[in-house]
Amino acid sequence: MSLLARSPREAVERAVKTLPDQVAYGFLRRPETGLCMVRGRIGGTGPAFNLGEMTMTRCVVRTADGRVGYGYVAGRDRRHAELAAYCDALLQDEAARPGLDALLLAPLRGELARRRERRTAETRATRVEFFTLVRGEDHNG
Amino acid sequence: MADSTAAILRQPGFADPVHDSQQTFRAVLAAMSRPGAVVPLPRVLDLPEGMPAGALAVLLTLADLDTPVWPHGPAAGQDLAAWLSFACGCPLAASPEEAAYALMDIRPEGAGLDPTVLARLPAGTPEYPDRGATVIVAVAGMDGGCGARVSGPGVRGEGSIRVPGTDAVFWEYARGLGELFPLGLDFIFASRGEVVCLPRSARIGEILCM
Amino acid sequence: MYVAVKGGERAIDEAHKLLDKERRGDPATPEMGVGQIREQLGLAVDRIMCEGSLYDPELAALALKQAQGDVVEAVFLLRAYRTTLPRLAASLPVETEEMDVRRRISASFKDLPGGQVLGPTFDYTHRLLDFGLLGGERAADLPDAPAPDASGAEEEGGGNRLSGIASLLAREGLAEASEDDGSVPGDLTRDPLVYPADRSLRLQALARGDEGFVLSMGYSTQRGFGSGHPFAGEIRMGGVEVEIAPEELGFPVALGEITLTECQMLFKDTGDAVRPPQFARGYGLAFGRCERKAMAMALVDRALRVQEFGDAVKGPAQDQEFVLSHCDNVEASGFVQHLKLPHHVDFQAELESLRRLRASRESRKDDAAKGEEAC
């Protein structure tokens, strides 16, 4: 579910379109946008405090064969929440999982990893490599 | 997830959450501002017989993450509690003292409203009287039953209110609550398709139990 | 007292039209897209999210566009918008130690585990106007991306994870420990602030407080109106995963990643009978890349802990009622700007009272003059 939430909606949409079997579904809870209070920790590791809110959208779908899928995504994209819920419902089918993993999740995982790697490389390039100047020592002896 | 709970979760809430809850809110507001007046609910939830559809429509409208709900008596069944937290997104209160809303089902014969439970619900504080709880009572219908004469804001002269399933003990208790005003409890009685309200501002006169 | 006055409606409509025209500026220049603002004025967007107390870059960019670049007005727009949405969840506390770090520096330790990672910073720029930007950038001017580095991606979840300095010190007993006692934090958006406010409420208020105000308060503590010498133990910025635990699921799920800036300030505490000598900590956490804000917040957080440390009170930054009641720029702006509302009746009353005072002063003068003459 984390992968579906973190991937851009367009990427999830693209991945879903590649699936050979589309399953009919209806809403148990229509996509709904609201707020999530983001909590931090006092001192970084201590008790919680309320930092501020973020927008989120949630959705619950039920497929024709009775599987229930939940979608929760940051932001206000209703379609994204719907797609996340739909994929979650599909993934409830243990038998279908390996196939879905290859078709649906693997491309998303790859895209996310590439984005991460790019960012990590950019960041690592700004790491300071200290070198100490040697002084006051006799280099000749 | 237990199968029965999963089944109950499949019961739909409002078909059009925004508009249906706005219209239901309007109906509850009308009922609250006219104590004793029976107001039809604009949307009747299509729920199985056992579930208190009217009371749940009111909760779908009013309750959210910030309002802990205390389901009491028959309303406290696990399935209904699961439906509440799913459909309303509201937390369930750990005790009556924490409740913003209480849900009480007095449709079964002899269930009644128990003053010892009502007394545990928050009645607000002098600084924040608005923190008093609202009691949503599921009733079988709107005909007959015990009641009282009411006067005060929203009632021209004197009116009356009757609620099936209530008894004289409850109405005595409600009359006593009036002395706490502006603290107190507000009551919303909901049948499948109608509501009638007893806000804390209503003054209760003669009790009608005949 | 305010009296409703009718008759301004047409003028107000016209004023709105004029405001729209001003916002657009000269139509001969291209209109700015919200996407451009989000991508190219990111620090303004972050500040609006931080003080608007709502993380949504697109909405913050829209607010900035609509407010013609007036940040406080944009914060107001965002705060107004958030009141229209239901709250669906409260997150689990975010773990900043798990941050995918894009910047992490310490002024206290040169050789800290993981090193000093500068990230995107103004710190080493020369503050010279870059006239190259006047003519627009050419694609060729943009720096090349470094080759992807997969070494980090092999770790759990990938990214750049670095352990926190303050907790390393705390583990050695050299800095105060900060452990979760499971307490439920207060929420000033739900319950009005009552003084004294506990630290969770103070941090919430500071996190959404005006950067200028918090900065000045923090600055005042450094200039002797506060509590001891601060060291920037660690400043980090990067992506943090937000998780919620919906009741209907019974297990946590991730909503996505947000960017946060965190600051751990260290202050020497010589200790007392209960507290051993160690570094006390001031804490700052802000949405987006708001480093100045997070640092100032950490200074003020420590200053407000006067009771805990038995500090001598030397300045307003140590007075929580002063700081918390005045740090919110929507409230401050509202109360200052409300003076523009008609106060005609109040003013009439004051005018009347002044006239009476003048009349009685004149008559006293006359009486005194008569008295002198009589002598």
Image (spheres, coloured by chain):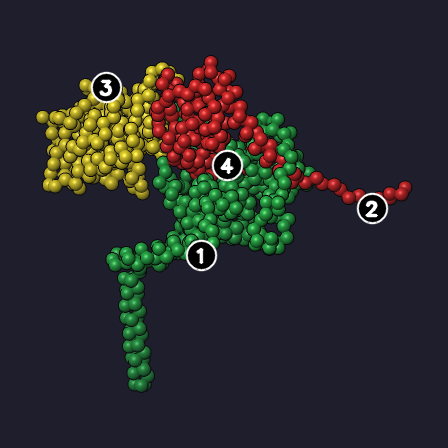
Residue at (20% x, 27% y) in the render? B193
Residue nearest the viewer, comparing C69 with A139: C69
Front position among marks 1 and 3: 1
Residue B121 screen position, x and y as percent: 29, 31
Residue at (50% x, 34% y) in the render? C257
Front position among marks 4 and 1: 1
As drawn, the chain in yellow is B
Residue B49's tag is 3
Disc 2 is placed on an element classified as loop
Pointer 3 chain: B
The amino acid beneath tag 3 is: Glu
Q: Image check: C368 left or right of A57?
A: left
> Of all residues shown, which one is farthest toward the front?
C28
> Of all residues shown, which one is farthest toward the left?
B210
What residue sits right under mark 1 in the picture?
A: C26
Rendered hue of chain A is: red
Kindly report the distance in space between the C-alpha atoms of the residues bearing marks 4 and 2.
49 Å
What residue sits right under mark 2 in the picture?
A: A136
Residue C363 screen position, x and y as percent: 28, 77
The amino acid beneath tag 2 is: Gly
Kindly report the distance in space between the C-alpha atoms of the residues bearing marks 1 and 3.
65 Å
Kindly report the distance in space between the C-alpha atoms of the residues bearing marks 4 and 1.
36 Å
What residue sits right under mark 4 in the picture?
A: C258
Residue C272 screen position, x and y as percent: 58, 41
Disc 3 is placed on an element classified as loop
Residue nearest the viewer, comparing C93 with B30: B30
Q: Image check: A95 left or right of B205?
A: right
Pointer 1 chain: C
The amino acid beneath tag 4 is: Ile
Front position among marks 2 and 1: 1
Kindly report the distance in space between the C-alpha atoms of the residues bearing marks 2 and 1.
65 Å
